[in-house]
Amino acid sequence: MWNNKLASLRVAIATWAFMGLIGIPAFVYFDLFNGWRWRPYNAIYEQMIASIYVAIGACSVLSFKNPLQHLSFLWFVVLSSFTHGGVMLFRALHEPSHAGHLIGDVWILAGGLGLAVLLWGLKHHGGDRH
């Protein structure tokens, strides 16, 4: 059971690594979700967002081998996902011109929630093992 939880956590970490290093930068630069960009277009803002997620992706790669030694970073991913996704959900629901963010950004809430569930499960079911 312990190995299954750790394997599931590693799948989540690998997903964050991929999305941070490749997925989100591609979505940002190529506007794959047509309408995802803020108007008026701001390349500097997009570079800043992409760079943050590249850093998250790189740190996710580093945490993959032994996630239990990187719990603070993984909880940072959870919390930053909730705050980013929550802000974008609010904007998308209150400003019709930002409805594209429901597709582009709010999934980050789900990714953060999934990671939180896995981390919580490890913590409350023997997560102190090394």
Image: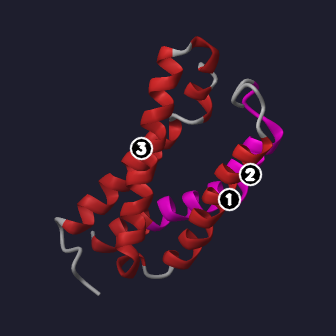
Separation of residues labelled 1 and 2 (CA atoms)? 6 Å
SS label for mark 2: helix
Classed neighbour count for the residue bearing mark 2: other residues with Cα under 10 Å, few (<14), some (14–19), many (≥20): few
Residue found at x 26% / y 67%:
122
Separation of residues labelled 3 and 2 (CA atoms)? 19 Å
SS label for mark 3: helix
Q: Is residue 13 magenta?
A: yes
Say whether disc 3 or disc 2 marks the residue closer to the N-terminus: 2
Residue that protrudes farthest toward the bottom in the picture: 130
Residue found at x 50% / y 43%:
108
Q: Are marks 1 and 2 in contact (CB under 8 Å)?
A: yes
The amino acid at mark 3 is Thr
Which quarter shows the N terminus? bottom left
Separation of residues labelled 1 and 3 (CA atoms)? 17 Å
Q: Which residue is mark 1?
A: 51
| Rendered location of residue 6, percent (x, y) | 37, 70
Which quarter shows the C terminus? bottom left
The amino acid at mark 2 is Gln
The image's mark for residue 83 is 3
The image's mark for residue 68 is none
Quick check: 9 above or below 46? below
The image's mark for residue 47 is 2
Say whether disc 1 or disc 3 marks the residue closer to the N-terminus: 1
SS label for mark 1: helix
Q: Which residues are magenta?
A: 10-34
The amino acid at mark 1 is Ser
